[in-house]
Structures are given as structure tokens and as C-alpha cells.
Image (cartoon, rainbow, N blue to C red):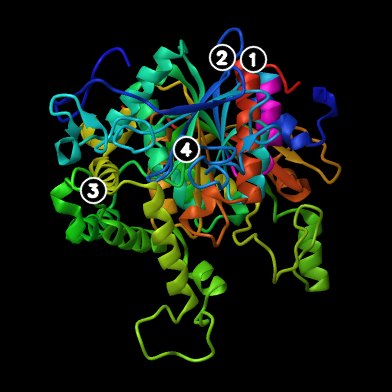
Amino acid sequence: MDHALVTDGGRSIAPLAIGYETYGELNADRSNAILLCHALTGDQYAAGVHPVTGKPGWWDALVGPGKPFDTERYFIICSNVVGGCMGTTGPSSTNSSTGKPYGLDFPVVTIRDMVRAQAMLIDHLGIETLFCVAGGSMGGMQVLQWAASYPDRVFSAMPIATAAKHSAQNIGFNEVGRQAVMADPDWRAGRYLEQGVRPEKGLAVARMSAHITYLSEAALQRKFGRKLQDRSAPTFSFDADFQVESYLRYQGVAFVERFDANSYLFVTRACDYFDLAADYGGSLAKAFKDTKTRFCVVSFTSDWLYPTSDSRAVVHALNAGGASVSFVEIESDKGHDAFLLHEPMFIATTRGFLESAAVARGLKARP
Amino acid sequence: MTLTQHPRLDHLLIADMVEPGARVLDVGCGDGALLQLLARAKNVDGRGVELSQRGVNECVAKGLSVIQGDADTDLADYPNDGFDYVILSQTLQATRHPREALGNMLRIGRRAIVSFPNFGYWRVRVQLAFRGRMPVTGNLSYSWHDTPNIHLCTIRDFVELVDNLGAHIERGFALDHAGAPIRVNAPWWVWNLMGEQAIFLLERDAPSE
């Protein structure tokens, strides 16, 4: 980026690199661009095959030809958030003033800083108004921030499985994760990259505890119950006797291969600081006053990390502001992660909302 | 579909009560048929509230702004005077607190339009009086044990409630068994006896000086 990003904390990040992917083609009048905002540990690889993990992108269920985010109709942009570790400047990037990785010298960033960086990318791509900004979880917070910060640049918005502020429970879980990272002897006060080590055990524990919050009790019970892993009786040890233990250990190990521990500290902190109403004198409705953006808010019945009540608070604020808003609570037992999975009712809702918004925007039907 | 082909006469009568370009909230909007009609025929800025996920999804897919929610609990969150009209079509009898729902409607909107099945309809009275059975009619098509309708009333009951709420009836129709409007100059007892369903346009009483 040509100019520095000035953060809410009053620091500036320069130079600022942004890692991003695009899918589909921008039309002649630049009216078909959709910005997808990734969740906490997601990245810019929303669709196709992820270059690091070799697995499908995080929203491969929804992004592609003929899918709701139709790459033959829309121009889809997904960028890595500031503070991340997949090409956008973050704590593992080199601090130009020291020549070493930032580590904890990286400025504490906010959701609004992430959105500011995205807006710089959208400017860079020559796009004035986004047809849609969509995303779940932390990505949903970015969607809400976009709609509040740049109401004229967002034609439609889909905040999914998210909240306008982090609850004490959410902050609590994030703190457990951060403390796990910082308790790892290999964390070295955040200077591990210079010392050639990585706090993998701490980060894996952080991921394991967070992963439980992404699922529902019913889904865990159905998938694992008390089933044992590769054995017929308990070993009376601390091996991974139970399948659920083995599963979580795998999730932890797989995560550290693709994610930076300091980035985990910074992005969780950004979520914890998020409180959109606080920026508008405590009134969430003021954040969306006189907005012309069309909203579709989605929650899932078994999401206990961002429960439906959080989405309803957003809907009430939008209603109070007279916004055009749809709200659907999708019946699912898959927990918070339901928004990443092939959930037919959610896919149908997304398709319907985007198609009707496309008609209102005057976008041509799918070729 | 042209207006005359719209399948529900009660929807057409409701649409006739709405001024063009108005802001309308349809509570219990179902599959959004009325909102679509209003958008097309009256160019209204329409919003909906619907309990069923299927209904909400159908509405969203049609491009309508509809919120999944419950008339009994969610109307309280809407600000005063946010809409020109709040519509409750064939839903009043399924609310837990009809009085509160109507009160909220008249707070949120300057005007309210309510349609409901008339329990004073002569066929209803006949079934209860002579067969000794809970009535099952075209408009009240459920058996007593699995009906969503928990607060049935007659037209006379409804008129009394409106008076209690500090509102008055601007216009009203009773529809007979064939769905045809009963003559507006007919006396109340005729409406109450012959109307299978009723549609009323209510307006808040002006505050006294």
C-alpha cells in the first residue's frame, strides 16, 4: 500500500502489505465486487485449494461457479487481515525500523483497523462501492464495521454468526488461549522467531480450547461420545484414550503448521476490543443511522459462542435505525462452525439474499 | 400476475387500505405474498416479521426484508412511529397476548390493519350450539387439540378491544363464506353473524388537549 495505516491505538504501520485473493471478474462498471471477511484463524484462501494445507478454502461450500457467491457473476475479493500471518503485515513481518520481526512491538490492532486496511485495498483495486460485504464470526464483525464506517460503499451486507461486541465469555476463552501461548517456554516474550523456535505446544492448546467453542455439545456427542481411540479399554494413562482427545490434539497440531502464535494474540485481542456501540455513544442504532445498506443477519441455533441473542441485538439496532434488514436463525446442531459447513438452509438463504440484492443493484443474471 | 389474479381477496382489500409509497410492517407475513402484492401494487417500503424459518427463507429469496421473530416478543423492540401501517393478517388469534400485540402495532405504526376469523360467524355458532363440537370451518381449519389459534374472538369482541386501546376503526369489512364483502351499511349484528372473517383499518385516537 502506498500510505501508512494509522491504527486506533495511534500507531502507524508502514510499509503495509496486504495478502489477498480474487475470484471471478470485475464487470465494466465495477458494480459486482464482493468482499469476503475471514474469521479469526482464516485467511484469504476462501475457495479452491489452500496452498499451505492442500485442503479446500474456508468458504469453498459457498464460493465458486453456480454457488451462492457465484464466481461467474461476482468479483470476489478476500484479503488477509492486518495482524495476520498470510501475506498481510503482522507481528511476524519485519519491522523496517529494527530489521527484525515485529513480535510484540506490532501495534495492537482493532477490527476497525482491519477494515481500514481492507478499504485501502478496495481503493487500490479502483472499486468505489462493494456489492456485498459478507463474513462470519470475526469476519461478521468486520462486516458490521464496514457498514458503520463506510455506509455509502456497502450496497448489501451479511453479518453471519457474529456480534456487535465480544461477551465476557468470549473474552475469557480468548484469554485462556493467549495465556497458553505465553506460558510456552518457547514463546520467549514474543521474540521466538529471532531465536529459531516456535511456541507450538502453547498455540496448539489455545486452538484445542477454542475449537471446543466452535462446536456444539450435541455435535461433539454425536461425533465422539465416549468412544475410545484405537483401543478397547482405557490405558489408565494420559494418552489420548478418547477419540475426542485425539481429534483435538490433531486440530492443535494441524493449526500450528499454518498459523503464527503472535498473530493469534493480536487477532484475538482485536475481537475482544470490538464494541461497535461504544464508538457511537453506546447506541448501536446510531452506528447504522439512515443506512441504505441491505442487511441479511444470520445466526445458528446451536452457536453458543455468538448466540442468536447477539444477532438479535444487531437486528434490533438496524430496525431502530429503519434499515432494510432480513434475519434468519438457521436450525443446526453444528455449533458456531455451521457457517463454514454445507448447511442447506444457510446456503439457500445466502443465495436468495444475494440474488435479490443483485436485482436491486441491476446486476445481470448469471450467464 | 396481475392484481385481479391475486388469489386472496383479503390481501386485495388490505392493499386497498394502504396509501401508495407507505412504510409497512407485516407481522406474521408468511411466505411474503401480501408484501409482494403491496410492493407491486402500492410501491410500499415493506418489512416483515415471520415465525417460521421456511417462511422467512421464502421471503428472503424473494428479496423481501423479513426478520425471523415472534409477534408476542419482538414487536416491543420496534421504535415508536417507525411505520405508516402495521399489518397483522390472520395472526391475531395465534398470539399469546393479543391486547399487547395490538397495542404495540398502534405504537409502531400510525395505523394498523388487522384481519382475523370471526368466531361469531353463524356456522361457528351452529356447530357449537347444535352439534356440541368445537367449530371447524374453512377459516378455522384445525381440530381443537392441535390448533395454533388460542385467542379467538368475535367481531364485537374485537371492536370493544379497539375502543379500550384508545384507537378507532377507520374502515372495516366482513367477508362472507364466499369471500365477498358484506355491505358496509349493514348493521353490526349482521357483520358479526354473517362475516366469516373481518378486516379492520385502525387508527390511534388523537390525544385529547
Q: Are marks 1 and 4 on the same chain?
A: yes
What chain letter is assigned to the residue under label 2? A
Distance (Cα) linking label 3 and label 1: 54 Å
Of B26 and A343, nearer the camera is A343
Judged left or right of residue A109, residue B24 is: right
Kindly identify the amino acid type of the residue bearing the numbered disc 3. Gly
Distance (Cα) linking label 4 and label 3: 35 Å
Kindly identify the amino acid type of the residue bearing the numbered disc 1. Gly
Q: Please give the residue where the numbered disc 1 appears in the rendered image.
A: A362
* Mark 2 vs 1: CB contact within 8 A: yes
Of A73 and A251, nearer the camera is A251
Select label 1 or label 4 by which is in front.
4
Q: Give the range drawn in magenta.
A: B27-40
* Mark 4 vs 3: CB contact within 8 A: no
Q: Where is residue A42 in the image (x, y as percent from the top left)?
A: 43, 43
Q: Please give the residue where the numbered disc 4 appears in the rendered image.
A: A135
Q: Position of residue A249 (x, y in %)?
A: 41, 67
Which circle marks residue B202 in the picture? none
